[in-house]
Amino acid sequence: MIEILEKAAIQNGLVTAFAVVGLIILLSGQISRRLTFGRVHGSAIAIVIGLALAYWGGTQTGGHKGLADMTLFGGIGLMGGAMLRDFAIVATAFEVQATEARKAGLIGVVSLLLGTVLPFIVGAAIAWSFGYSDAVSMTTIGAGAVTYIVGPVTGAAIGASPDVMALSIATGLVKAILVMVGTPIAARFLGLKTPRSAMVFGGLAGTVSGVSAGLAATDRKLVPYGALVATFHTGLGCLLGPSLLFFATKALVG
């Protein structure tokens, strides 16, 4: 019986992946409600569980794709790939009302630029403080602080080493988790009550996963607006990272 189930799971890898993720989300929701009383959103807990499972999968197989290197969980590699990720990001925009989105106006654009440049500066400065003083490494890690997608894209474009690109991804993940956990706590102080405030917050925070999960724990109606502006960080970061930000960093550090 077990062999039959295992064979079915392997042959239907994507279905298995959805089932595994569904169980993790169910478990994370229970942990969020019963242990943190809703203060830490289930999405943040799910990501931590996912990272732990990815680490375990890597240690068991010696691979580089976490659980996806295991035959039984091979479908997770497809589910977590760029295709479904981009589909999920684009889908958030369909819940946005155009009349509310226009209210962001100039302040939304300014928040988007600040949310791209300021994290880059912080990430590059931290990279320099830890000994990564060359322009390529500083730019790559700084770009990772914008989002964990921008980091490796920028690193690949300017010739960063795999280790540095891995650090940029880790930097972006830490930022995403901090935004997830911190948003519900700071929501009242930040005034996250309207679509416009959510769009400004999304522009400043700049991580779709962090903003979406954080706003979901604050007010689900604000999620599409925050995610709408945060989504632009990926494109803007990928545009500015290997070009303007790299040349600016190179001019400063040589």
Image: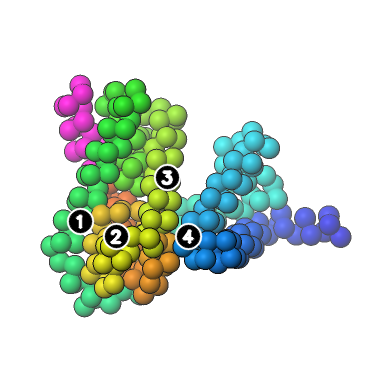
Q: Is residue 25 visible?
A: no
Q: Residue at x 27, y 62 (%)?
A: 190
Between residue 64 and residue 108, name the one nearer to us.
Answer: 108
For the magenta stretch, what is the residue range? 239-254
Few, some or many C-alpha atoms within 10 Å of disc 4 (few <14, some 14-19, many ≥20)? many
Q: Earlier in the sequence, mark 1 or mark 4?
A: 4
Are circles 2 and 1 on residues that touch, CB within 8 Å? yes
Would you say the magenta stretch is mainly helix, strand or loop?
A: helix
Q: Find out whether residue 235 is within the magenta segment.
A: no
| Numbered badge on residue 202 | 2
- Residue beneath label 3, please? 174
**Distance of mark 1 from mark 4, alpha carbons?**
26 Å
Q: How is the image coloured?
A: rainbow
Side (left or right) of 240 relative to 181:
left
Numbered marks: total: 4
Side (left or right) of 109 relative to 61:
left
**Distance of mark 2 from mark 3, alpha carbons?**
17 Å
Q: Is residue 1 visible?
A: yes
Q: Amino acid at mark 1?
A: Ser
Q: SS for tag 2?
A: helix
| Numbered badge on residue 238 | none
